[in-house]
Amino acid sequence: MTNRNSLSASILAALLASTGMAAAQDCAEPIKVGVLHSLSGTMAISETTLKDTMLMLIEQQNAAGGVLGCEIEAVVVDPASDWPLFAEKARELLTVHEVDVIFGNWTSVSRKSVLPVIEELNGLLFYPVQYEGEESSKNVFYTGAAPNQQAIPATDYFLEELGVEKFALLGTDYVYPRTTNNILEQYLKDNGIAEEDIFVNYTPFGHSDWATIVADVVALGEDGKQVGVISTINGDANIGFYKELAAAGVSADDIPVVAFSVGEEELSGLDTSNLVGHLAAWNYFQSADTPANAEFIAAWKEFAGEERVTNDPMEAHYIGFNMWVNAVTAAETTEVDAVREAMYGQEFPNLTGGTAVMLPNHHLAKPVLIGEIQDDGQFDIISQTEEVPGDAWTDFLPESAVLKSDWQTLGCGMYNTETETCVQLTSNY
């Protein structure tokens, strides 16, 4: 005899499936999204905002029905600007909390700390900040800028538009500034800049005494040549650097600075009246005049407070999160390997106009913008390109120029185009 309750359950299941609600019945637990950003320490000035961004995006997605009919739960941890702790917290997210994906990191040293854990446990990381390239992991989607989407175009602007003849490459002492500056040194030499006209200096995280370094930069121009600063200074050290520039009476007309890690959030803590005219290179600025950006800004201010500003890594999380949601929806699962396959070719509108596209090398095609600091802490966008495909491996270092990354077709992040072989050098990470 047929069990009436079983029959009723079968009919209900069929009805739910026909209305697209079946997935909701499979949600014994919410889909978990790990948020791995420093909420304390020297990088909190930049990363706390990215934690808040993820909370807003998850709240918005839940209001729209979640994903696969399931609610999304944010699991927030604080790696406290401590690079080894990033690895521990990533392992905690994947093994204790069993998150389906992680959005996080700012510095490359923190990302490289996390990378072996992500690869060992087959996790998935969306990394939202500009970086030095020279890396390609099947477990990471790099939604920030590669050097050819930020550092190289900014250097071209100095060379072609501002006539800079001497370069001061100032960076925080870790892998991103050092690798980026290695690329830029070679690029500058290839473009006719003499080695003696390139000054390179590194300082620790949180560095505060900038008087001697600023004096050294000013001294570069004593021969009358135009000096420009390319800054890969990260975190709260930027506050002291820009204050010392102002104290030394250095204006953007005297020595222009283009920064790769200073955006609206960092400027919100500074008196910008003496910084007008200095530059930053990103893929997004709050001042972008598009309907989508206006909507994003309004939502952010409603969520976080009227005084809060937006910035480039926020847009990278916005694009990456929405692409992940769409990939999960297409794959009908949060399983990492299936989501990875569904990510290739994902498109999502940039907040600055145009469309971001996820490439087989796990990088985005994105526009490059150069902005000029205004006295209100915002940027006047003075240059914007069409979408530029991100390169995992730079064309400007001989050992990297022969490499390509293609996880979709070749299944390889370091494919040597000369030997036509796949190189696996996870120890590089």
Image: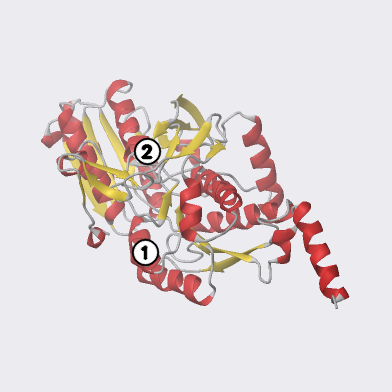
Looking at the image, the residue that sits furthest to the front is: 1
Residue depicted at 42% across the width and 55% down the height? 106
Q: Which amino acid does label 2 sit on?
A: Gly
Residue 45 visible in the displayed image: no
Instruction: Give the quarter of the figure containing the N terminus.
Output: bottom right
Front residue of 217/180: it is 180
Residue 3 percent across, percent down from the top left: 85, 77
- Horizontal side of residue 157 vs 275, given as left or right: left
Image marks 1 and 2: residues in contact by CB distance under 8 Å? no
Q: Distance between the residues labelled 1 and 2?
A: 22 Å
What's the residue type where badge 1 is placed? Answer: Glu
Q: Can you tell which quarter of the image residue 16 is in? A: bottom right
Within 10 Å of disc 2 (Cα), the crowding (few <14, some 14-19, many 20+) is many
* Disc 1: which residue: 119
Say which residue label 2 marks: 390
* Location of residue 412 with respect to 199 vertically, above or below: below
Does the image show residue 365? yes
Against 27, residue 186 (above or below) is: above
